[in-house]
Image: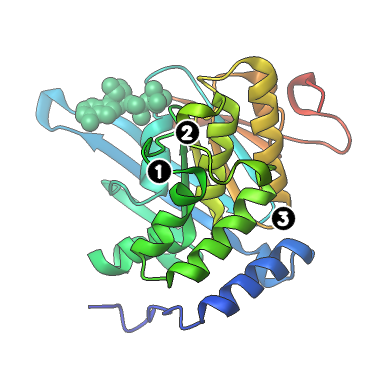
Amino acid sequence: MSDPIRPARRDTRTTEQRIDDAARAAAAPPSASESEAVLRLVGVSRVYGSGEKAVTALAGVDLDIRAGELVAIMGASGSGKSTLLSIAGGLQQPSSGEVIVEGRALSSLDAKEMARLRRRSLGFVFQDFNLIPTLTAIENVTLPLELDGDPAREARRMAEVALDSVGLREKHNAFPDDLSGGQQQRIAIARAVVGGRRLILADEPTGALDSVTGEAVMRMLRTRVDEGAAGLLVTHEARHAAWADRIVFLRDGRVVDESRRDGAESLLGARR
Ligand code: ADP
Ligand code: MG
């Protein structure tokens, strides 16, 4: 089952402890252990198909993202951005290389451990929000916790904290259709971070939003990362990538360039 050299760390904390830990992580500056990479890609390649039809979507990508760090991935359509994100989130496996999330090599996890890690450590945010229309805001955020076996009352409390943190205190009982696109995306962000999840993976989360709303959603993502999560953001838009600490440029599945925020100067000249 699990690799004896790298024993699976089972989360034995109670729900109360997890709420407390999440609150503490949000309040405290990152400690030495938190500055370890939350996500590490080592020589990750992905080939779709085989023989003459083989397409190399990723070719030897190395990437580390630490707690408190937001990394933007940019690149032309077909450069491998979505493949990178889904491999980072364990939705598909690399053809070679390794993905390490919070110190655990994904290849060492069995299906059950993998599903658990996805629910406990990872949050996905997509362009089209992916909310369940028949559930209220609070129910959408509560659902993944309840699916994972958290008692309903505790799950609800964690969901309330997450929704409040994205400024939706007044909208807990609203249905997605009665909310604006920006508010819906904020629910999706709350769902991505609820219960203290540390790695947020966002594939063009502002793609369906107007520029003012997109900006607000970026501010929200940035805040969550500043509170201790690690973020990987795919975007086409330079002004949204400018919220990142680092921009990684992909071409034909390879990292061809990287730019870092340098002091007070914003990336790509955009202003925060
Ligand atoms: P991006 O998100 O940057 O547009 P993708 O990761 O979606 O890039 O795709 C990278 C390359 O892999 C493209 O050439 C694409 O056509 C190919 N590709 C992506 N998914 C598949 C798949 N499921 N089967 C075959 N080829 C794929
Ligand atoms: Mg894509």
Local secondary structure at mark 1: loop
At x 22% / y 78%, what residue is drawn?
1
Q: Which residue is mark 3?
A: 227
Q: Nearer the viewer, mark 2 or mark 3?
A: 2
Please tell me in which quadrant of the rendered image residue 61 appears: top left
At x 70% / y 29%, what residue is drawn?
216
The residue closer to the viewer here, 30 or 53, is 30
Amino acid at dot 3: Glu
The answer to whether any part of residue 110 appears in the image is no
Q: Are marks 2 and 1 in contact (CB under 8 Å)?
A: yes
Local secondary structure at mark 3: loop
Q: Residue furthest right?
A: 264
Amino acid at dot 2: Pro
Question: Residue 259's spot in the image, x, y percent?
Answer: 68, 32
Q: Residue furthest front?
A: 173
The residue closer to the viewer here, 266 or 116, is 116
Q: Is residue 28 left or right of residue 156?
A: right
Q: Quadrant of the C terminus?
A: top right
Q: Is residue 155 left or right of residue 218?
A: left
